[in-house]
Image (tube, rainbow, N blue to C red):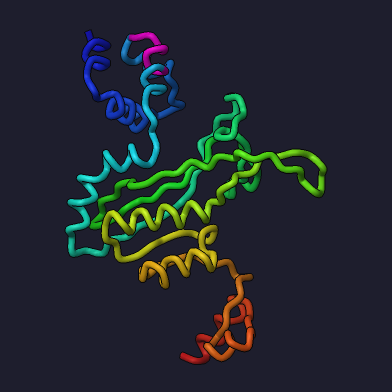
Amino acid sequence: MISNIVFDMENFVDLYTDYLITSSSYTTATGMASLLSIKHDKITQELSKGNYDSKFLWKKAKPYVEELTQSKEVIVLSFDDSIQEKQYTDESELNCWHYDHVFGRSVKGVNFLTALLEVGGMRIPCGVEFIKKDLWITDPKTGKKRRKSSTTKNELFRKMLVECYGKFLFDYVLADSWFSSVENMICCKEELKQDFIMALKSNRKVALSKQDKENKQYISIELAIPCFFKRS
């Protein structure tokens, strides 16, 4: 009876999302099928029917984003990338090896970049891009072939940022040090006129004045911090 209700209605995505959120251990098609007392092939078939990309996500998120962005509170758009490990799944351009900064090593899985809207304590994802390593290159050091993406994460960051800018208003852009490149900062401040907060590594170099910049006199942030305190 349950299976007929579930798969006759257009609510599979909501059902699947609820399953992911409420599960306290590994989530699988077999586990969800067991919970609903149906064959796991039905879960796989439903998942293969849709194209769950950023357009699909935006269609779901749009009415909530439009409501939230009417708020007078500070609206923040944050970016971060994550890796969903899938070590037992066959390698492909989507499921392949990525360096994980949490563990300090490469892991096999799906790497994706998300855009998250936050306002008044409410958060909702409004964009997602999957990193696909669609190119094969030869490592000059080892001579071995390895996968590489034709589009970098920073290029995806700017693409997603521009798309979000065209859809709704926000006050700040937040990102970690991985995305704090000069090109990304220029995209935020000069092209889109958006304020941003990004982490910087201590070995990054800055100019302490416009004159220093024109003379190409840069020092590391680690050395620059004491200079800022002295000036203040």
The residue lying at 26 percent from left, 54 percent from top is 121
The residue lying at 56 percent from left, 51 percent from top is 152
Percent across and percent down for residue 191 are: 41, 69
Is residue 42 rendered magenta in the image? yes
The residue lying at 30 percent from left, 65 percent from top is 171
Q: Main secondary structure of the magenta part?
A: helix
Percent across and percent down for residue 126 are: 33, 47
- Position of 128 compared to 145: left or right? left
Q: Quadrant of residue 34?
A: top left
Compared to residue 122, the image places residue 29 above or below, namely above
- Position of 48 compared to 106: left or right? left
Percent across and percent down for residue 11 are: 25, 25
Compared to residue 157, the image places residue 42 above or below, namely above
Q: Quadrant of residue 40?
A: top left
Percent across and percent down for residue 64 are: 21, 46
Span colored in magenta: 38-44
The count of marks equals: 0
Compared to residue 169, the image places residue 4 above or below, namely above
The residue lying at 42 percent from left, 18 percent from top is 44
Q: Nearer the viewer, residue 211 or 27?
A: 211
Q: Quadrant of the N terminus?
A: top left
Q: Nearer the viewer, residue 22 or 180?
A: 180
Q: Quadrant of residue 159?
A: bottom left
- Position of 13 compared to 103: left or right? left
